[in-house]
Image (cartoon, grey):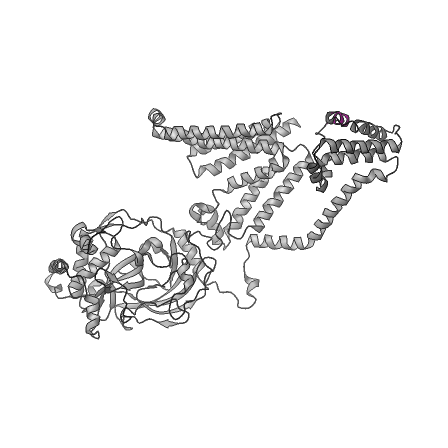
Amino acid sequence: MVKGVRFRELASALVWACATCVATFFVSLPSAALIAALGGFVGYLVGCALAATPLRMPAALAGGLLAYLMTTLAAGLFCDNYAAASALGAANAFTASQWFNWGGKALCATAMLRFLSGRQPFLISAEILSVTLLLASPLASHRQGFINRPYFLVDPLWSQNLDPIPVLFALGAVAAALLVILQNGRRTRRASWFDMLLLFVIIGLLYAVVPDRKLLDFDIHDPFGVKGKNKQGEGGKGKPKDGKPDKKDEEQGGGRSEAEEMPLEKPQEDKSKPEPVAVVLLRDDYDPPYGYYYFRQTAFSQYNGKRLVADTTGKTDQDMLPGFPTQPISIQSTVPLNSPYHRQLGTKVAMIKGHTKPFSLVDGRTAEPANNPNPSQFVRAYECKSLVLSCRFDQLFPLKSGDPSWDEKTWKHYTALPDNPKYKELAERCAAQLPPQYQQSDFARAVAVKLYMDQTMTYTMRASHEGYPDPVAHYLFEDQRGYCVHQAHAAVYLFRSLGVPSRVGAGYATDARNRGNGTAILLRSGEAHAWPEVYLQGAGWVILDISPEKHEGGDMDQPDPNLQRMLGELARDQKGPPEDAEKFKKRSLQQLFRAFLLAAWSILKWGFLAAFVANYLYKFFRRFEPLWCSSQRLPVAALRSGQDQLAEVGALRSFGEDRMVFARRLGLEALEPLTYWHLAATMGGKTPPAKELLQLRERLHQQIARRYSLWRRLLGFINPLSWWSSK
């Protein structure tokens, strides 16, 4: 028996070691994870030893808290102390700090939890749930909220169209159940099975009650964690009125493209940690000649004396979506239908973040609403058809700039620029570098300006041009450091100084290489962009973006290809049979488990109620049985009634303790003779008159009332299960 108990203790300690190692491995050094595992193992055994000593609980808790603070202090001394870093070396000092931090904390926390559960059996649930959380912590929300990790577990599930969240919950439940099965410290078989049953009930209820895809504030509307911290409304319900964006979209995260709000004067935030904003599905294969996919949301063409802003006359820039489509609409594209330089391409846009304006792959021609394929993930969806450029740039050199149908006001609108001769001087110098055969080509002259800016400008998000009357002039002629808004404004001013109508487009631009071999394009907040466009007869607005060769930071990581692929799959319409659709709808493991519990509860709730009432009735029967039982039964009934009352106040006989020893230990005068007569009756000996036994039972009742407080007796009295502990 002793060997079995020791084996179970060691097995449980190993489970704690695994839990602390798993929880620490992903947030610290591998060696620190091993030290944490050692701390969990030793801490569990220390807790078992402390629980078997007469050490008082307040003293043990105070000692545990002191040890915890000392390990924290020691970890800080190694990490923050210059002398320690000098003596050990920076790397060794940091390693020692991690060892003390994770190993010491694991030892103290595990020891205290085991001590508490050993002293108070009902706290076993807290110990088990702690292990569950430790084992599940590397998977909970998957670091930065991406449930597509870890790949080795999630990829096979997604490939079978299975939701990984219930599987992760199940892993946590299995881990917790393992600890309960191995758990030592329950001194009777009944208590061990009771603890196991209690844990399974708690885990099962958590698994069923916690909403789908939600654990520890896990957003139900954002299962992939791709919407950031902004609040999201219900997907696909907001509709624009009269072509204007509805108020709901303005309140949903993101709102505008970041390029719409980038100032010219101040530096911008780093884009290295972008958040997904939309998924675009290409209906056909297309590789843009620019090397980038451009999604235009708005345009800035009106010069207001300081910078370019969106048109306020309502007469220009009509080639963009006025609002999210509620019915099929046509866009006044500037590209002719029979353009030999373009081809038609369909796209589907599924918005992850709400925007005040929609965007389309340039150049958009038609748009229509689409069913939201996954309202829990996407805000809305719509279909677009665009005329996309499909020729080489040199094929556009013969085209003239502008449109012969424009009036004088439109020409002035698209050629206005600051009254600074430097713009024209620089543009003319750039154009003069062209070969003679291209000197008269408007587009070739614009390309010469682009090439000059590519070679001389530096891209950086940290540039500041605050305090200058013309920030663009300061960027172009002096500092030559800036980001896309500076580049686009400067290029447009130079184009316009050559007489080439141009404007700044804004929206999103993503590297075509990020698409890989799929048809899904993941747009991210860091890809918000502004670019210059020139107008050519027969081709409409053509993007002529600036790509500086010199960069100062600002580089953005490539999108996660697995996340891009999975979001693309979610954005596709999963069309099933129109009739009886619910029969074809796949249900997750959690939904099935929840349905099972609801069905079981509808059947068993009356059984639970009956069992609850039966416990009370049987408890009162045992309590008052001496008043009506026979004289032969009275010695047993009288002692059992007294022991039930003692159990209500927590006075219990220890495992293996003799009844007479228990009676003497409590020191209640009436308990010892009641126990003696009970043993005598059980062994077939003589018993006293019934009146004497009833008097002893009444005296015991009075002695219990004098020793134990009223509130303690009342709490025990209303507990329907208190008689279970009587023995």
Quick check: 556 above or below 488?
A: above
Q: At which x and y percent is residue 579? A: 55, 68
Instruction: Give the overall secondary structure of the magenta segment.
Output: helix
Comparing 723 with 392, the one in front is 723
Q: Residue at x 48, y 58 (%)?
A: 376
Picture quadrant where residue 371 is located? bottom left
Quarter containing the N terminus = top right
Quick check: 446 above or below 679?
A: below
Q: Tell me if 155 is positioned left or right of 505 in this view.
A: right
Residue 45 visible in image: no
Q: At which x and y percent is residue 226? A: 42, 53
Comparing 486 with 591, the one in front is 486
Q: At which x and y percent is residue 614? A: 75, 46
Comparing 384 with 506, the one in front is 506
Picture quadrant where residue 84 is located? top left
Quick check: is 662 in the magenta stretch? yes
Q: Residue at x 51, y 39 (%)?
A: 134
| Total marks placed | 0
Residue stretch in magenta: 655-664
Q: Tell me if 497 is positioned left or right of 604 in this view.
A: left
Q: At which x and y percent is residue 196? A: 63, 40
Quick check: 415 above or below 229?
A: below
Q: Residue at x 40, y 57 (%)?
A: 353
Residue 213 visible in image: yes
